[in-house]
Amino acid sequence: MQAFNIRQLKNNPSTALRAAHKEDMVVVMNRDNPIALLVDLEKMALPNLDAIKEALAISLFKEGVISLGSAARMAKHSLSEMMTLLSSLSIPLTGNNKKEAKNDLATLRQFLNDDK
């Protein structure tokens, strides 16, 4: 097990990720206080890692953290399969990211104003 402070993690996150892949886990420290763990999901020998990745993808999409395409790739689904899955869970395919929606609306308004 290795420990990285926040500055090390910020300056070179790939080193910490490689260490997590090589070791069991990496402890992230804030001063002398452990605040987080980096764990390589593949090394955890989880019984159904694909299902866990799918659940993470659904949750991250639902919270507006990742796009539909990113969620599909994370879950190892085609875009249409991911759309069907999200719809079956009553998760809207649009409107998850409020900032993105506001940007889209601003772009549309500008487009409509330029067209006059």
Image: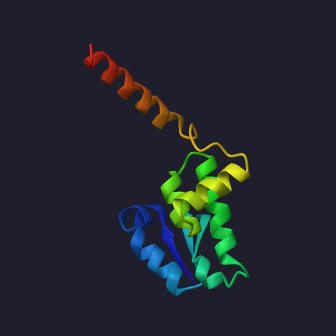
Relative to 29, residue 47 above or below: below
**Percent of width and height locating residue 103:** 41, 32
Residue 15 in view = yes
In the rendered structure, the answer to whether residue 44 lies left or right of residue 95 reads: right
In the rendered structure, the answer to whether residue 53 lies left or right of residue 90 reads: left
**Percent of width and height locating residue 88:** 72, 52
- Front-most of 37 and 73? 73
What scheme was used to colour the molecule?
A: rainbow
Q: Residue furthest top?
A: 116
Residue 30 in view = no
Q: Residue at x 64, y 65 (%)?
A: 54
**Percent of width and height locating residue 73:** 51, 65
Q: Residue at x 53, y 79 (%)?
A: 20
Q: Quadrant of the N terminus?
A: bottom right
Relative to 94, residue 3 above or below: below
**Percent of width and height locating residue 82:** 60, 58
Q: Residue at x 59, y 44 (%)?
A: 93
Total residue callouts = 0
- Front-most of 46 and 107? 107
Relative to 111, residue 61 above or below: below
Q: Residue at x 66, y 52 (%)?
A: 86
- Front-most of 15 and 76? 76
In the rendered structure, the answer to whether residue 102 lies left or right of residue 84 reads: left
- Front-most of 38 and 85? 85
Q: Quadrant of the C terminus?
A: top left
Residue 23 figure quarter:
bottom right
